Image: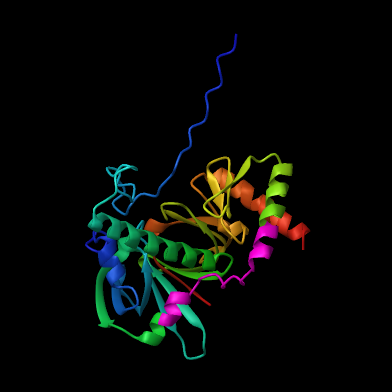
Amino acid sequence: KQAPIPIPVPVIRLPRGPDGTSRGFCAARGRDRAGSVAEVAEQQARAALRERYLRSILAMVGRPVHFTLHERVQVDAHFGATDLDVANFHVSQLQTPLGVQGEALLRCADIISYSFQL
Amino acid sequence: MNEWMKKSPLEWQDYVYKEVRVTASEKNEYKGWVLTTDPVSANIVLVNFLEDGTVAVTGVMGHAVQTVETLNEDNQEVREKLMHMFMPEESKAYNPEDLEKRKISLKSWLEKNHIPITEQGESQSTLCVAGVLTIEPPYGPEDCSSSNEIILSRVQDLIQGHLTTSQ
């Protein structure tokens, strides 16, 4: 006799904050407890800043982007996507000193800055 | 983790719309108007308006930031431009009958696709899918809200398909 199939539990994946350990949002704050005025203000700021950043990333998709890496290395590529924690950039047509790489994953830890034009 | 990354969202927000000079690792320097700082990575997004009319956008990675110096506090013209940068175009205004038609049309399309859908809200103008996703007027893919990425993606595709075939 087969065991009943467990009902999937909805999972909300929130990105981590820059310190790598927090979830970017206050875990202690329960859903049914309204935050203090300061907490609400901080959360609103966090949401507004993040939304703008995500929109700026969205605007980069498919465009040529210039990357400044360590040791004064500069490369150009077409931007594809980044992940939830902004840990990696997926790019295509990466122009490296050794030739063009069709697809590549740039670790954000290796990047100092990126730029593109509208 | 550097000082910049340890700042709070309110401190980061304070820099938005200001012109700053950012020094980063390996003596890299950047100047521009702050569009935003990502609270997840502390990446700073700077904007520069070039003489030929193009806009240059630079992202300085949070882990590489050494100092951030404010150069210019407020420029109303720049503020206006930054506020609307990357924002979607204003959706055209629909009259109530059109909205009702769009709602009914979408509702029956989703029901045909075996998606449990109900109407919610005081004016019954919000559509609710399976209790986990809401669709606000004017019922486009961008008007969906849900914490479930999979359902969100599926419903957005269905709406997009519906809009394409009915146009």
Please give the name of the residue rendered at 39% of the width and 63% of the height, measured from the top-left corner: A48
Specify the quadrant of the image occupied by residue B81.
Answer: bottom left
| Residue B156 appears in view | yes
**Residue in the image at 63% along x and 48% along y:** B155
Does the magenta portion include B101? yes
Q: Where B104 falls versus A69 (above or below)?
A: above
Q: Quadrant of residue B2?
A: bottom left
Q: Nearer the viewer, residue B94 or B73?
A: B94
Across and down, in percent, residue A35 comes to: 27, 50
Question: In the image, is residue A85 part of the stretch drawn in magenta?
Answer: no
**Which residue is at the far top?**
A1
Q: Is residue A22 left or right of residue A2?
A: left
Q: Which residue is pictured at 27% across the width and 83% down the height? A: B71
> What residue lies at 46% left-to-right and 79% top-to-bottom?
B56
Quadrant placement of the N terminus of chain B: bottom left
Residue A63 placement: quadrant: bottom right
Q: Position of residue A109 (x, y in %)?
A: 37, 57
Quarter of the image where the C terminus of chain B is located: bottom right
Q: Is residue B28 left or right of residue A36?
A: right
Up the image or down, B131 lies above or below B87; here it is above
From the viewer's side, name the closer residue of A83 and B109. B109
- Residue A111 visible in rendering: no
Residues drawn in magenta: B80-102
